[in-house]
Amino acid sequence: MEHNEIKPMTNRQDNLSKEFLTIVEAAKYLSISESALYKKTSNKEIPYYVPGGKKIYILKGDLDNWVLSGKVNPVSEINLETERYLSRNSKIQMSC
C-alpha cells in the first residue's frame, strides 16, 4: 500500500520536471479542468503546439507566463504608480 501512496507523488514530480505537458498534465499543473484548458487553447489565450496535427502539447513556461500575466496589483502599488505619473507630468507642464 505504501507503493501506491508514493506513485502519485512521483508522477507529480515527473510532471514538474517536464518541459512540455499534455492537456491532462497541464490542467493538473494549473489546477483547472481539462475542458477549461481546452477552451483557453481554442480561444488562443494560451500558446500550444500540435505536432502531427492531433495531440496538444503546452510548454510549461508558457503556462507560468500566462499565470504571471494575470497579476493584480495591490492598491498601495497602484497609488505609488499614480503618484509617480502625476509627479512626472506636473514637472513637464511646469517647464512648458
Image (cartoon, grey):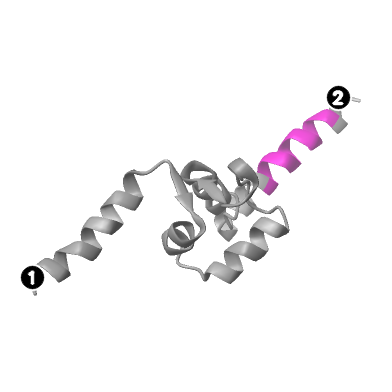
Q: In the picture, which quadrant includes the N terminus?
A: bottom left
Residue 39 among those drawn in magenta: no
> Residue tagged by mark 2?
95
Q: Residues under labels 1 and 2: Cα distance? A: 74 Å
According to the image, label 1 marks what residue? 2
> Along the polypeptide, which appears first: circle 1 or circle 2?
1
Mark 1 vs mark 2, foreground winner is 1
Q: Which residues are magenta?
A: 82-92
| Residues at circles 1 and 2 in contact by the CB criterion of under 8 Å | no
Left or right: 1, with 38 as reference point: left
Residue 89 colored in magenta in the image:
yes
Kind of element beneath mark 2: helix
Badge 1 crowding class, 10 Å Cα cut-off, few under 14, some 14 to 19, many 20 or more, is few
| Kind of element beneath mark 1 | helix
Compared with 27, 61 (above or below) is above
Q: Vertical placement of 49 versus 9: above or below? A: above
